Image (cartoon, helix red, strand yellow):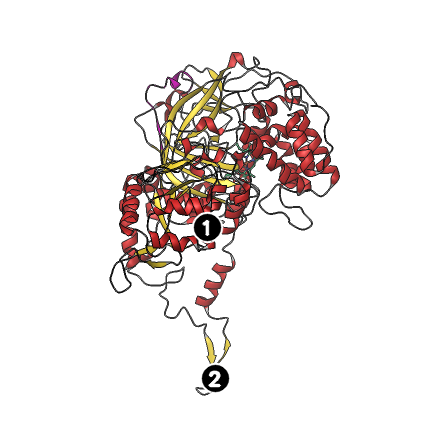
Amino acid sequence: MSSSVARTVKDTVLGLADTKKVKDMRPDIVDPSKDDVGMTTDFGIKIEDPENWLRVVRDAGRGPGPALLEDHIGREKIHRFDHERIPERVVHARGTGAHGYFQAFENTGIEKYTLAKVLTDSSRTTPVFVRFSTVQGSRGSADTVRDVRGFATKFYTDEGNWDLVGNNIPVFFIQDGIQFPDFVHAVKPEPHNEVPQGQTAHNNFWDFAFLQSQTTHMLTWIMSDRAIPRSYRMMQGFGVNTYTFLNAAGERCFVKFHWLPELGVHSLMWDEALKIAGQDPDFHRKDLEEAITNGAYPQWTLAVQIIEERNEHAFDFDILDATKTWPEHQVPMIRVGKMVLNRMVDEFFPETEQVAFCTSHIVPGIGFSDDPLLQARNFSYFDTQISRLGINWEELPINRPVCPVMNFNRDGGMRHKITRSTINYHPNRFEQVQPTPKAQGGYASHRTVMTGHKDRLRSEKFQEHYNQAQLFWNSLSPIEKQHAISAFSFELSHCDDPLVYESMSARLAEIDFDLARQVALNVGGPIPERAARVNAGNTTRGISQLEFIPAEPTIKSRRIAILIADGVDATQVEALRAAFKSAMATTWLIGPRRGKVYGAGQTASSSTGLWADHHFEGQRSTMFDAVIIPDGQAHVNLLSKNGRAIHWVREAFGHCKAIGAIGDAVRFLENVVQLPGITYAPSTSDAVVNSYGVVTTSKVTLAGEAWKLVKGDDTFL
Ligand code: HDE
């Protein structure tokens, strides 16, 4: 009964999410809450007893004897269980996904470059499925580790599936796909002891990183705050590789894809990320689910950078080199559409685990470039799906296109489709299944003249590895630089081979003298006397997270804790909750115990009281974006004697969170918690201001959303 009620609510909330893809999958959905059949085996016979194996009963007094292999029902159950696991993804094993849609903006002018209808036709809504992931850790690893995040989008277009398989960082470690297995072996847990999990902080990774100086630019990104996002919803996404667009006139240009999050780009602090990894390893997974189920649908703008074919060689870097960005001051962004995620999956395994992306899945109007990393990816993704899911993986509900599929590919393990025809080849005497001419939508590769000789090499510009690492570094704000210095120091401290940490900290002098000196001091590397190369101080746009603060900061989907104890002003708490709810933030009452907490004048015997969602230990400050302490003399007295409550607020302060106090609670902050640098509002006001934000009874402003980018006070952690 209760589950069918929950189900109805979910469907209503997500009514808008009925995209063509969601409808396409509907026949495959079974719903036990609507079951009118009862329990059956996989071959459909009704089961009478699923709890007792078939046994030999010798006589009534002695109880049952041996279990019989004959029990086909018991055997089937065990067989199915024994084979539940499939290989996890060789990289990006840990992830979560959601459904949504993409819609092109009007009048973008993008048809000048591409004939891809998904990008040019603003009247269309294209269903999407997005899977976010970490890279290094296995399926059960924690969400908040320092790592690149995968951002893979499957567009179910009317012209076939387009998979934009990107990351939250615009460059990659290596330039040529032939090195991918070496890179992945080096980054993954070491082979002798399978350590460490969900971390790059080990000898083998930094050994490879040093020996392959092409990694340098990427290293600066993963040691920045980008590698510890606050939420998947607050990350940029990048296609990374260089693709091509083809327009109706047959002209080609080069393109890079970008996702810009509506909520801005925000990160955790490192101390916070470390703690959350233990306190709630599913933090990002739950965050996505919480936002979508509350109707705060995450949204991104798709933007492209375009370089016309004639300008391919006009830059001092090779535009096909995946370790380079196209700096925004040189190549501007064109915003082409928006993506909204508005529906969680019904079941994790058949959707999120079985979704399979392929960079080789492109639609007319989009093509590849000669980027050697992309070419290798085009081979690798299809190949890995065969070992993960079998050759018929494209028939699985989550993977199959929403447009017709018709060809003579046949058979193979686990074929689902049944084709009614005497013909399974082309050409055939009945002219069944004909190719489509380009003019009517057939995919045609760009006609390109090719001459050359076979060789294994990279172009000259691929040999330059430090310019953009330095550009990135220079473009960070001072506090972002401090965070990156700490990150390099943490990682290299975990390398115990001096050859590794000494050589790598010396390499940093190629980027910046100050960076190299501070890291060397921290980790015991050789202290450089001068920079290894001149730093002219060039900067570019689109690097510092400060640039991604939304013009109108919002607390939509933010988690706000209200600290309470007995004697709190319950009416005020209710008012706070209502105000935050109307701003689409979630509020959580944190008290001395989970259960009833009584406001001034309320008693256990009356039916009044507030329900605390968690006790102070149950959910730490790390789980929230802001904390507010309401008025109430007795409650403030109780909080003042509670070490955990005091630490709660101090830790929130250390993590640069907005903290608010009302009435008597101001005294708690001032005299007991003793936070430095706070301007206490006049006693008549209900607001408290600290350098990290403003909290009033109706509003939380997270210091212009730059709140994580000031240096936290370590002494409070
Ligand atoms: Fe991947 N990558 N990759 N990768 N990658 C995989 O495919 C590979 C690269 C990315 O949520 C695998 O289905 C090669 C860059 C994401 O299911 C595998 C090379 C970027 C995901 C594979 C790269 C990515 C993967 C493992 C270098 C950012 C998760 C499982 C030539 C643009 C997709 C799978 C999901 C997954 C190969 C480099 C992003 C083995 C050979 C660059 C987001 O095929």
Residue 112 on the magenta span: yes
From the viewer's perspective, tell me whether residue 170 is left or right of residue 396: right
Tell which circle, 1 or 2, labels the residue nearer the N-terminal end.
2
Q: Which residue is mark 1?
A: 646
Q: Which residue is mark 2?
A: 58
- CA distance for labels 1 and 2: 67 Å
Look at label 2 and name its amino acid.
Arg
Check whether the beta carbons of the residues at disc 1 and disc 2 lie within 8 A of each other. Answer: no
Neighbourhood count class around disc 2 (C-alpha, 10 Å): few under 14, some 14–19, many 20 upward = few
Residue at (61% x, 32% y) in the render: 219
Q: Is residue 621 visible?
A: no
Residue at (43% x, 42% y) in the render: 97
Q: Nearer the viewer, residue 440 or 107?
A: 107
Q: Position of residue 74 (x, y in %)?
A: 46, 67
From the viewer's perspective, tell me whether residue 2 is left or right of residue 341: left
Where on the image, by quarter, is ligand 1?
top right
**Looking at the picture, does residue 694 appear above or below residue 77?**
above
Q: Quadrant of residue 579?
A: top left
Q: Quadrant of residue 338?
A: top left
Residue at (47% x, 48% y) in the render: 282
If the image is split into quadrants, where does the N terminus sit? Answer: bottom left
Q: Residue furthest left?
A: 606
Does dot 2 land on a helix, a strand or a loop? loop
From the viewer's perspective, tell me whether residue 615 is left or right of residue 495: left
Neighbourhood count class around disc 1 (C-alpha, 10 Å): few under 14, some 14–19, many 20 upward = some
Residue 415 on the magenta span: no
Look at label 1 and name its amino acid.
Ile
Q: Position of residue 444 (x, y in %)?
A: 46, 23
- Read off the magenta span: 102-115
